[in-house]
Image (cartoon, grey):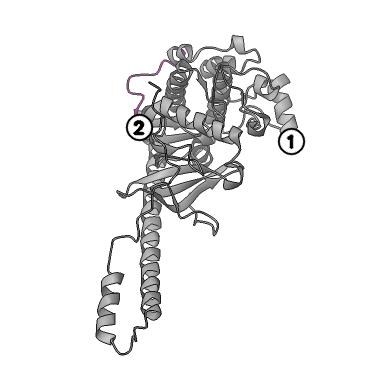
């Protein structure tokens, strides 16, 4: 949910003016931002203190590439990006739907038909990534947004090509406990099969409202991932037969996404899961609330801009020696005109570090 900007947050990034915070972690922050044309976007950036690290920059460029690969059907469409800026940033469409974990916490486990539709859609998203040799590496309920048009996979912060690039240790991020595959926990080579393991853990959570691997400590959870059996109590036999193979310890024993789609046996009317019923109602409620908050945050920004404009005008009049009392009529007219303006204040200057992205091919 959006929260006010912190005192040390930038005012603008590239051509975007920041409106509110959407979330923050150890690597960076995601903001709600407005473009020159008034479009609302989700803008992700790295923390300034680590933006100069070459490994962090390499990882950010990979995130931009992966977000472009998945496209807008299964992900948040990339609107703009500048991974070469002094503080790199990525702007995507602002998705209004709730995350899967929020939905399950709020309304309980999803019905079987919805989970089948969810699994098929996520498999299609993973298949699109894997065909481009990209492994997401961090598929989990909080990285899956539910919309009226189906789920969208986000946050490619640790996505990487399956071959060809090894990042330095400064870029190593611990796998999410309970969702990362055993080979990720053990630091072994990661293939697309790791995303299939994460998919199995996500579907188990969607079906039961509980994690497949639990523990009182991170180390206990990770030990269970590597050596224990998943908790699938309450999963009816037909769906258990689909989910359990995804959680195999051996990557080679896990099914391919295309195989899972066929086994899910989703009807042609699967989109009803997002448009009707309890799940659709939860999505609609969150979309309405998010849209209202977007409007409120934008209105607050406009009020702040107007207040700043008034302060600048008064400061300018004082500096140039204008006596307000003597020119009351004129000054009142000036203040009234400025205060009623809807221009939104000065436009953000483009970043001097901006590059074309993707960069042009040589020759």
Q: Position of residue 337 (x, y in %)?
A: 26, 72
Q: How many marks?
A: 2
Q: CA distance from mark 1 to mark 2?
A: 37 Å
State whether the magenta stretch is mostly helix, strand or loop. loop
Indicate yes or no whether the magenta region holds residue 269.
Answer: yes
Residue 319 location, x and y as percent? Answer: 40, 78
The residue wearing badge 1 is 217
Q: Is residue 60 above or below residue 8?
A: above
Report if residue 188 lies within the magenta region. Answer: no
Looking at marks 1 and 2 on the same chain, the residue that comes earlier in the sequence is marked by 2
Is residue 204 placed above or below 12 in the rendered structure? above
- Label 2 Cα neighbours within 10 Å, binned few <14 / some 14-19 / many ≥20: some
Q: Report helix, strand or loop for mark 2.
A: loop
Q: Position of residue 162 (x, y in %)?
A: 55, 18
Task: Tell which of 358 and 267 is nearer to you.
Answer: 358
The image quadrant that residue 252 belongs to is top right
Q: Is residue 122 left or right of residue 215?
A: left
Q: Which residue is mark 2?
A: 149
- Element at label 1: loop
* Residue 328 position (above or below residue 125): below
Q: Residue at x 74, y 25 (%)?
A: 223
Q: Is residue 161 visible?
A: yes
Judge by depth and name the residue closer to the eye, 359 or 150. Answer: 359
User: Where is residue 147 drawn, in percent x and y?
Assistant: 39, 36
Q: Nearer the viewer, residue 46 or 346?
A: 346
Residue drawn where x is 63% and y is 22% of the image: 181
Q: Is residue 126 above or below residue 274?
A: above
At horizontal 39% and vertical 69% (from top left) the residue drawn is 307
For residue 228, say whether it is visible.
Answer: no
Question: The magenta stretch spans which residues?
Answer: 263-271
């Amino acid at each position: 949910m959006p929260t006010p900007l912190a005192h040390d947050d930038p005012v603008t990034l590239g051509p975007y003016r920041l409106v509110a915070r959407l979330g923050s972690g150890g690597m960076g922050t995601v903001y709600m931002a407005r473009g020159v044309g008034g479009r609302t976007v989700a803008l992700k950036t790295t923390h300034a203190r680590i933006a100069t690290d070459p490994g962090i920059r390499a990882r950010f460029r990979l995130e931009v590439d992966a977000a472009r690969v998945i496209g807008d059907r299964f992900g948040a469409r990339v609107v703009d990006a500048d991974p070469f800026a002094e503080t790199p940033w990525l702007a995507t469409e602002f998705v209004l739907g709730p995350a899967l974990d929020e939905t399950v916490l709020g309304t309980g486990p999803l019905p079987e038909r919805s989970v089948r539709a969810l699994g098929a859609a996520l498999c299609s998203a993973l298949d699109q990534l894997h065909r481009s040799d990209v492994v997401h590496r961090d598929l989990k309920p909080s990285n899956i947004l539910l919309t009226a048009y189906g789920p969208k996979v986000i946050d490619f912060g640790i996505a990487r090509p399956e071959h060809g690039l090894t990042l330095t240790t400064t870029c190593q991020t611990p796998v999410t406990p309970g969702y990362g595959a055993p080979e990720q926990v053990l630091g072994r080579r990661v293939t697309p099969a790791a995303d299939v393991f994460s998919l199995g853990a996500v579907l188990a959570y969607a079906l039961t409202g509980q994690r497949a691997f639990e523990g009182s400590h991170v180390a206990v959870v990770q030990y269970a991932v590597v050596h224990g059996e998943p908790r699938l109590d309450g999963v009816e036999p037909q769906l258990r037969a689909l989910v359990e193979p995804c959680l195999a310890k051996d990557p080679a024993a896990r099914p391919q996404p295309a195989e899972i789609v066929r086994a899910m046996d989703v009807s042609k009317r699967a989109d009803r899961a997002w448009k009707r019923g309890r799940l659709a109602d939860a999505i609609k409620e969150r979309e309405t609330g998010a849209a209202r908050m977007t409007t409120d945050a934008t209105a607050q920004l406009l009020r702040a801009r107007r207040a700043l404009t008034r302060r600048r005008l008064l400061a300018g009049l004082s500096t140039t020696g204008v006596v307000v009392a003597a020119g009351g009529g004129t000054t009142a007219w000036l203040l009234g005109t400025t205060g009623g303006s809807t221009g939104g204040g000065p436009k953000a200057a483009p970043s001097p570090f901006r590059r074309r992205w993707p960069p042009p091919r040589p020759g």
